[in-house]
Amino acid sequence: MTADGGPELVQLLTPEGERVHHPEYDVDLTDEQLRGLYRDLVLVRRVDAEATALQRQGELGLWAQCIGQEAAQVGSGRALLPGDFAFPTYREHGVAWARGVQPLQLLGLFRGVTNGGWDPHEHNMALYTIVIGDQTLHAVGYAMGMQRDGSDDAVICYFGDGATSQGDVNEAFVFSAVYNAPVVFFCQNNQWAISEPLERQTRIPLYRRADGFGFPGVRVDGNDVLAVLAVTTAALQAAREGQGPTLVEAFTYRMGAHTTSDDPTRYRVSADLEAWKLKDPIERLRVYLARNGWADSDYFASVEAEAEAMAIHLRDGCRALPNPVPTSMFDHVYAAPHPLVEAEKAEFSAYHASFAGGEH
Amino acid sequence: MAATTMAKAINAGLRKALENDPKVLLMGEDIGKLGGVFRVTDGLQKDFGESRVIDSPLAESGIVGTAVGLAMRGFRPVVEIQFDGFVFPAFDQIVTQVAKHNARSDGRTPMPITIRIPYGGGIGAVEHHSESPEAYFAHTAGLRVMSPSNPLDAFVMVQQAIAHPDPVIFLEPKRRYWDKAEIDEGLDLAAAPSPFAARVVRPGSSVTVACYGPMVRTCLEAATAAAGDGVDIEVVDLRTISPLDVETVAASVRRTGRLVVVHEAPVFLGLGAELAARITEECFYSLEAPVIRVGGYHTPYPPSRLEEDYLPDLDRVLDGVDRALAF
């Protein structure tokens, strides 16, 4: 497998920031929209950096970094229409950004104050799913529901290269294919499943897996926000038009660790990282904007200032996130009252009330 | 009204659920034209269409996982797992997703999913077709676990399971599919007894026998046999094992002073263990004997020529009763 994604890679913006054309995919964006994408990328990277720092300071128990994958996430997230629905893993901070989930809402899970964090129905984005690949089947089921509702919307489902080995992901491919479900499978191939390289998951390029399931697969430069936007928009449109699923393989690189608990120096060489730094998703767009005169240094400075303000807000907000009330663990175990849960909640409360001064 | 088999009673219950709520969908392997391997869904695809009665690919995790997404979209999926021993490919989806979505989302994405599973032995089947996996599910917070013992309960409880906002593992005692009883198809669901309440199906004074699903008939037969020997067995049909109606059992044990718990599932860490612990705690001064458990052994379900040796039968229930009365 080629390290550069090979000739099949759909690219509209080279790592050097040059706009190139592809026979099949294109985008037509105003300079304002291009600046908007740049702002998205910068702010998402800042969210990621701040959260990583908050973990180092002990404010978060863990953080799953998305650095390097911002274009894959923002490009696909911005391809969605309001009625579309996204099913993320636990690393889709850029998708969450595009769906209007506040960055602070992402931190609760990693701080340990909630297992969720936002209203899936408000943002049309499911909660982070930690079990690898489970959400792909949820996505297909949701898309089957859309079919039955006569909806013109579509579903996008995120997962990584490691997940493609999971049975559930392959079952999701089968179900979506036989029911022609309106779903886009968006695989961010960041080359690493914790310590295992792509070679431990596959011997053919991942996008070609789609062939065996009977739907199209396409490999896009995951560090090229324009190409990702173009490819995802087309795949979503095909889904809306009743053409069924598409597998999009966003060829990218996990610039950070798997999570803040990981140590990539044990299993990968720094030369790879250096090579991928040259393909950075933000830098190429910055060059493209500057070279065409669509953004000047004042604009770039204003985005930096916005990122700084957001970072302060995020830091303060994180530290202020309240611990949940202990008895809240008994709430919502079931949707309707369950006598055992109610009895245990009462027992728990009585136990704590038995200590002088109330809660133990 | 003519007597109906349990399989047909569940079919009638599913039909009513499909009629009453357009969001109800059925999904499973071979449930369409074939009507399911036990014919429980016979005729439903013909009457409600392929969009609502869905033949699925042969993948249990896929069935349950897509049901999660359908539930998020506002549907009420009723999925069939063909046999008890085939639920395990879906175990991850059931335990990590179906059971936990409501809590994870603070109640925003409830999972009104019914997972129907024909379970238990006694039909001379090959491996993986005779198991009783209820303890795994009862052990998982977020799931409810029901097991009707007779056609009328099956007809009502399957509808109650589907209408309920929580996910329900609906365990159908497959060897009782052909048992017959009268059902009232015009029954008002709102007026039906709660599925979560146990029921004294035979009053008695000597000893309480608690059971559910396929063992209720066995225990009732044992009670009839024991009556000839002057032993008056009270049989409690638990009906639902999560939540477990301990209070009905406790009230019985306070009268009889003795408890025998019977299930097909292995005794070790089975429902009997939980019931024994709770009854010991609640009825310590009423108990005349330790709680006795009668059930399967700590072995894989044996080849079917041995299943009569493995499964509790009338004699083993009476042996358990004798052991309780020996104190």
Image (cartoon, helix red, strand yellow):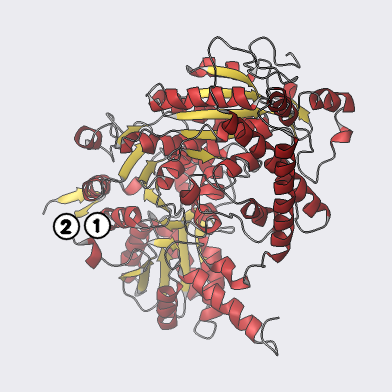
Q: Nearer the viewer, residue A43 or B107?
A: A43
Which residue lies at the image location 65% right of the left edge and 28% below the top edge? A294
B259 up-or-down from A215: above or below: below
Which residue lies at the image location 58% right of the left edge and 78% below the top edge? A347
Examine the image and state in which quarter residue A267 appears: top right
Q: Position of residue B272 (x, y in %)?
A: 52, 64
Which residue lies at the image location 39% right of the left edge and 65% below the top edge? B238
Q: Is residue A349 visible?
A: yes
Q: Position of residue A295 (x, y in %)?
A: 68, 32
The earlier-in-sequence mark between 2 and 1 is 1
B238 up-or-down from A296: above or below: below
Mark 2–mark 1 Cα distance, whole angstroms, equals 8 Å
The mark found on residue B184 in the picture is 2
**In the rendered image, residues at marks 2 and 1 fall on the same chain:** yes
Say which element carries label 2. loop
Query: Mark 1 sits on what residue?
Result: B152
Disc 1 crowd, CA 10 A, few/some/many (<14, 14-19, 20+): many
